[in-house]
Amino acid sequence: MPAPGCPPAGALGQWPGARGGGLTAAGAGDRSDDEVPDAALAARARAGDERAFEVLVRRYQAPLYRLAVRLLDDRQEAEDVVQDVFVTAWRRLPALRDDAAVGGWLYRATTNRCLNRLRDRRTVPDAELERLPDPRPGEQPERVVEAAAGVHALAAALRRLTPEQRAVWVLRELHERSYDEIAGTLGTTSAAVRGRLARARADLAEAMAPWR
């Protein structure tokens, strides 16, 4: 067993975007464990099975990192958030009442940490949402410039949303979470989620109208 409060050695792989590049899978052990349901892995991890926790990290580290990057627009800060989520998860696994809910538990912890950081900011730093692809051979330069402008316009429009609206939009549109799942993540109701999403979509549609 690792020291109290610390995840298993090797469980936290190199996060995407970290120095060295790419995502290194955590716990490169028996890949047959990748087929084990979340509930079984959570139960085993709570009982002290380090490899089970490593599989959970391998399963969720990439989507949680993408979620944090979308919300924070800062890769280093996103890495810090996800690292902290897994460290905290290992320590608090005994408090998890429903093993099957471990995925939602991790999403909720990541989202809440990101929202807290966003609320502490006065402005969100500029960052591209995606790295623009290289122009295709023969593609007109003005098309490349127009695409870049559209990406920056979307990033700017997302930054103007409230943290809660931005979280709802990212969880629904990019991570395809259900309204009930988002409500559970944010500690609100499905009706409130639908309202925030409608407002976010309307604001984004207005901001992106010139690029349609």
Image (spheres, rainbow, N blue to C red):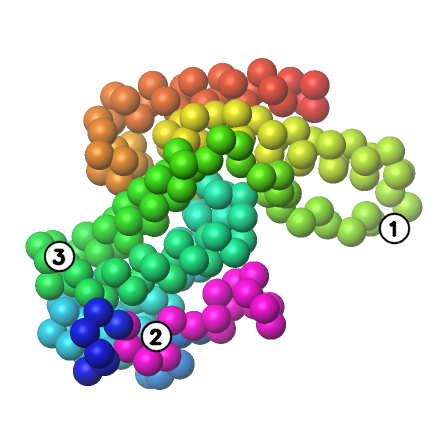
Query: Is residue 8 highlighted in magenta?
Result: yes
> Could you tell me which secondary element the residue under label 1 belongs to?
loop
Quarter in which the N terminus is drawn: bottom left
Asked if 17 appears above or below 118 in the picture, the reply is: below
Dot placed on the residue nearer the N-terminal end, 2 or 3: 2
**Image quarter for residue 17?**
bottom right
Segment tinted magenta in the rendering: 7-24
> Could you tell me which secondary element the residue under label 2 belongs to?
loop
Amino acid carrying label 1: it is Pro
Q: Position of residue 13 (x, y in %)?
A: 43, 72
Is residue 39 in view from this perspective? Answer: no
Contact (Cβ within 8 Å) of mark 1 with mark 2? no
Q: Nearer the viewer, residue 133 or 13?
A: 13
Crowd class of label 2 (few under 14; some 14 to 19; many from 20; radius 10 Å) = many
Query: Is residue 2 highlighted in magenta?
Result: no
Crowd class of label 1 (few under 14; some 14 to 19; many from 20; radius 10 Å) = few
Amino acid carrying label 3: it is Leu
Q: Which residue is mark 3?
A: 96
**Image quarter for residue 36?**
bottom left
Q: CA distance from mark 1 to mark 2?
A: 43 Å
In the image: residue 56, left or right of residue 154:
left
Residue at image location 39% in from the left, 57% down from the top: 82
Q: Which residue is mark 2?
A: 11
In the image: residue 158, left or right of residue 61:
right
Q: Position of residue 99 (x, y in %)?
A: 14, 59
Asked if 168 appears above or below 16 in the picture, the reply is: above
Label number found at residue 33: none
Q: CA distance from mark 3 to mark 1?
A: 53 Å
Residue at image location 73% in from the left, 50% down from the top: 133
Q: Which residue is mark 1?
A: 137
